[in-house]
Image (tube, helix red, strand yellow):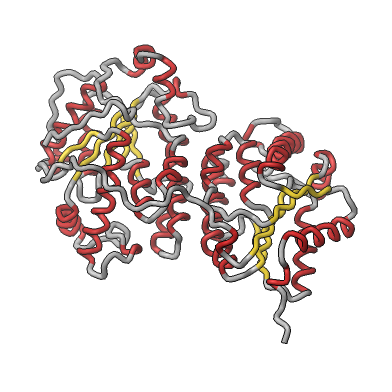
Amino acid sequence: MATVTSDVLAVEQPAAEKPPSSKEYPGALVVVEGIDGSGKSTQLYLLKRWLEIGGYRLHFTEWNSSPLVKSATKRGKQRRMLTPTTFSLLHAADFADRCERQILPLLHGGYLVLADRYIFTAFARDAARGCSPHWLRNLYSFAPIPDITFYFRAPLDVAVNRIVAGRPKLKYYEAGMDLGLSLDRAESFRVFQERILNNYDQMIETDRFVLMDGTVRVNKLQKTMRELLSERVDLARFAPKKK
Amino acid sequence: MKRSRSNSTAGVSPNGQGAKSAKKVKNGKNGNGHLAARFYGMPLPGVRPEELSGNLIVVEGADGSGRSTQISLLTEWLESEGFAVETMGLRRSYLVGEDIDALLAENAVTRLTLALMYSTDFFDQLERRILPALRSGLIVLADRYIFTLIARAAVRGISRDYLHGIYEIALRPDLTFWLNVRPEVAFDREFKKSQTISYWESGRDMSLSNDLFQSFVRYQSLIKREFEYLSKRHGFIEFDGEASVSEVNRALRTRIAAHLGIRGTHYKPSHALAHLWR
């Protein structure tokens, strides 16, 4: 057999798993981020209703909604066998599936894509579990960069009380019980959310978050959100065609 | 044969370190350097490298390279020498092993998702089975490792830097063997074994050729080229997988014995494994 000594012939390769630039597609990506109880989902729902009623070409996507890894996530959570790394990788696999099969095709097809949570959720949450921020950035480097990211920020107590009051029982991973922060779920949840909140705050400048005050009255905040979106994204591109 | 290649720059040190695991840490030329070297980059969250007293030995090679046969023989030999052995391989995790089987059967998955599911499978085994074994001083024999995962994804166009970034928190093997065979030979062996060639092993998803043989050979050639690159980067110890089972086995045992400090070892497969000895 011929000895392999020749120079390495590299397969043609991209330099890195670069996200597509927003100039490469006619769609636009709108993201809301923030800790649980910050009001982001309510606000995105209202934004979506406004656009739907106006007949805009849009698609709504949620974090962790694909059936692909559901059985694994469920198994892992039930048996409490997820580590920070496998927790993170499973969610990345799930996101990659949504990204390649929904988000990217829709952006290329000229849709306004609304995302309730995006990669920043993974950056904030998985880093709070102990994953290296550098490793996480690489893991999600294939994701398209949002046209606008609304960051809903509410004081920790306000956000945590909204969640704890409304839910009979916090789930194990949701409360960050895997980190051994506290034996009390509510207390563990609070400490975990505080870590996540701090991680989000670190990204305000680097990831050009648009800061939204989650304590402002709902309808007033929604008005601001609609104005900001109209300034940043050319909504006319997604408006129904005039006959 | 015996085309072993040592590569001191790439980190894996094939030079026998002689001493048993516990001493190994102290014997390292500079303690910190040695500890850091157990991982490619940052260690996995929550892992203390100095606790890992066992040894990780990886056997890589295409299907049909004799990899699994050698793992069976090495397991028996090591056990006969008094070493406890744990094994790992692809799609064997409790967490997602079956899910990947289902994805492969469905064939609707994208390359990136599949790559990340494989990495989940890998880290689930590593963290929950392999690291505990290494903490207990076991010898872990890996039937394929991150290199197959990197090569498969890279030939499908996922960036190598991206892949190395994901696996930089993986444990660096003490020894990595590559059983190198020509794709044509691998084809013959695989066909003989199962009377057909698997969809994925022939890279049918890549549309290389409608002819199964052509597709297999082209795909395995791409993988092989990727392995040549990885071999340089990570210092594989390369053996000719086309040599006889006993010859390859002897070469493997010589390197492993030197690494573990086993002297004067003799091995003949037991009755149960005699059929593998050709």
The residue located at (34%, 48%) in the rendering is: B151
B74 in relation to B192, above or below: above
Question: Residue A183's quadrant in the figure?
Answer: top right
Residue B104 to residue B6: above or below: below
Residue at left 70%, top 55%? Answer: A148
Q: Quadrant of the C terminus of chain B?
A: top left
Q: Is residue B256 above or below residue B90?
A: above
Left or right side of B167 for B20:
left
Provide residue B221's location: percent of width, then percent of height.
23, 53
Q: Residue at x 52, y 43 (%)?
A: A138
Q: How many marks?
A: 0
* Residue B74 in sight here: yes
Tell me if A176 is positioned left or right of B199 in this view: right
Question: In which quadrant is the N terminus of chain B drawn?
Answer: top left
The answer to which image quadrant residue B203 occupies is: bottom left
Q: Position of residue A46 (x, y in %)?
A: 80, 63
Image coordinates for residue A38, horizontal then vertical, percent: 79, 48
Evaluate whether residue A175 shows in this view. Answer: no
Query: Which one is in front, A195 or A52?
Result: A52
In x, y percent, where is residue B90?
36, 46
- In the image shown, does B82 or B265 lie closer to the viewer? B265
Pick whichever, B168 or B262, lies toward us: B168
